[in-house]
Amino acid sequence: MEGTRLKLGDLQKIAEHEVDFERAFKHRINVCCSSGCVPFGAFDVLKAFQEAVKEFGVEKECKVARTGCVGTCAVGPAVVIEPGDYLYQNVTPDKVRQIVRDHIVLGLPVKDMLYQNEAFFKKQHRLVLRNAGKIDPTRIQDYIAAGGYAAIVKCLATMTPQGVIYEVLGSGLRGRGGAGFPTGQKWSLVARSHSSPKYIVANLDEGDPGVFANRTLAEADPHAILEGMLIAAYAVGAEKGYIYIRAEYPLAIETLQKAIAQARAMSLLGENVLETSFKFDVELRFGAGAFVAGEETAILASVEGRRAMPRPRPPYPANSGLWGKPTLIQNVETLANIPLIVLNGGAWFSKIGTGKCTGTKCFSLTGKVNNPGIIEVPMGITLHEVVFDVGGGVADNRKFKAVLVGGPSGGCLPETLLELPIDYDSLTRVGAIMGSGGIVVIDDKSCMVDTAKFFTDFCIDESCGKCTPCRAGLAKIKEIFEGITRGEGNLEDLATLEKASIYIRDASLCGLGQTAPNPVITTLRYFKDEYVRHIVDKVCPADRCFKNVKEVNKQ
């Protein structure tokens, strides 16, 4: 029915038809074709499965489907065979015939090819990533069959805009983009504004290095983002939306473009959505890859065609955003939660996670960890559970040293804080942030002084330079770090580092400058002994610093 204008009741018919169609197959073979698997031959694996099921004469009982990332990024290409959710790792075209012959034809899963880290999924709670690896993101029918767009139908058929906001308020959902501002409260502010038109901006910029959860969501379940935007637009009275995505995400862009075209063709976007009086349309806007563009006012400038630079607030975007009009800016992960909240109720969502921090959070788990990848865990889970249960512990049998939470402007936390629950308030108290969801495990081969220096250099490169505290303050911190790592530091430098960091944090214009000193502050707080050894003993415990000095001395 793609290309046919649909009415409210038609989606249920499509869902029922697709479910019946799926039941005709005995097996579904889901081949991950995400950005993490494509470079390793995922499309070749997909083609090999399509050919193998024909060769063995089982094409009528096997559906071979392209899907997004299931989260096990280190072992791709990954393939999930249903029923039973059998996850095959490092699949190559030459392995496909054996999998089809043994698993599909003979009913004997190939055990030595299966993913062995069961703990990776055991403590996860998948809401946002509910469809990742399960549906074909290029087929809107797959999303509808999984219950997709039922929430916007419910809104248009039975709920008022105020009723939708009430459920979002009751859910306790906080923005997943970093700041953690209550989502329902933000929606209420935009809804109360009498100016028009109003806009929705979905933030898919994701500038943190090593963070790719938003990209994974866009590649695996683009319609969840679109449906979240539709519901938000209905609730606040917006008629136009923009997805702001960095141009370095070509597969995510292609997937979103196709999803938008399919949604328009089926009257889920555009004029008279599902033949009602509600109208809303979406466009993509591409960013040039600036880290500062993750700040909401910088996003607005970029969408408007200007350089991505933040501006002072107030006025806030809820009152004066795009082109001076009321604008709701939400991270795409936040929006992907919305359909579930509408369908199940805010009270249901509020029981997941903790009382002050409800729901789940997606993280990019990277660094020196055995099971890196994309995870989704309930709020309140401890760092220890994430690193040692979900993550499988430190790689190469090395000793745990620290975990960086919150990306390049997050905090480096020591082993003594591993029992800390992951929520906005707990992380803030110890000097870290939720950020966009980066968790980097650091082992004992790393130098914490060098780590803080590295992230300072990154923030300097990404700073827009508009405000003096960030521009000049970070440069001063870099200068001190260079002296310490060359063997020219003194103990007074530590007090200067701390004083400069606090000044930058408190006086900077936007979130980049306000959080950039976090790695410095937390390494000074929890790993001060390493700074002292660098300065007093001229020794780097990890043997990473003083290399240039040593080479000069040799000469």
Image (tube, grey):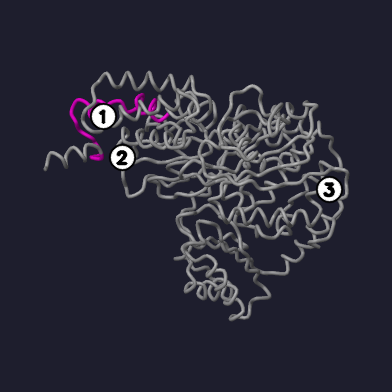
Q: Quadrant of the N terminus?
A: bottom right
User: Which secondary structure, mark 2?
Assistant: loop
Residue 6 found in image quarter:
bottom right
> Image quadrant for the C terminus?
top left
Q: Is residue 418 above or below residue 257?
A: above
Label 3 secondary element: loop
Q: Residue at x 32, y 50 (%)?
A: 396
Horizontal side of residue 363 vs 191, given as left or right = left
**Res. 527 image quadrant:** top left
Residue that appears at 21% across and 37% down: 546
The part of the chain drawn in magenta is 518-544
User: Chief secondary structure of the magenta span?
Assistant: helix
- Disc nearer the start of the sequence (1/2): 2
Circle 1: residue type:
Gly
Q: Residues within 10 Å of mark 1 (few under 14, many from 20)?
A: some
Taking depth in this image into account, of 176 and 209 the one nearest to the observer is 209
Q: The residue under label 3 is which amino acid type?
A: Glu
Mark 2 to mark 3 CA distance (whole Å): 56 Å
**Label 3 near label 2: C-beta < 8 Å?**
no
Classify mark 1: helix, strand or loop.
helix
Q: Is residue 473 above or below residue 25?
A: above
Q: Whole-percent x and y of residue 51?
A: 58, 77
Which residue is the site of mark 3?
271
Dot 2 alpha-carbon crowd within 10 angstroms: few under 14, some 14 to 19, many 20 or more: some
Q: Which residue is mark 1?
A: 483
Q: Nearer the viewer, residue 366 or 482?
A: 482
User: Circle 2 is placed at which residue position?
Assistant: 446
Among numbered discs 2 and 3, the one appearing first in the sequence: 3
* Residue 447 among magenta residues: no
Q: CA distance from mark 1 to mark 2?
A: 19 Å
Magenta-span inclusion, residue 532: yes
The mark found on residue 212 in the picture is none
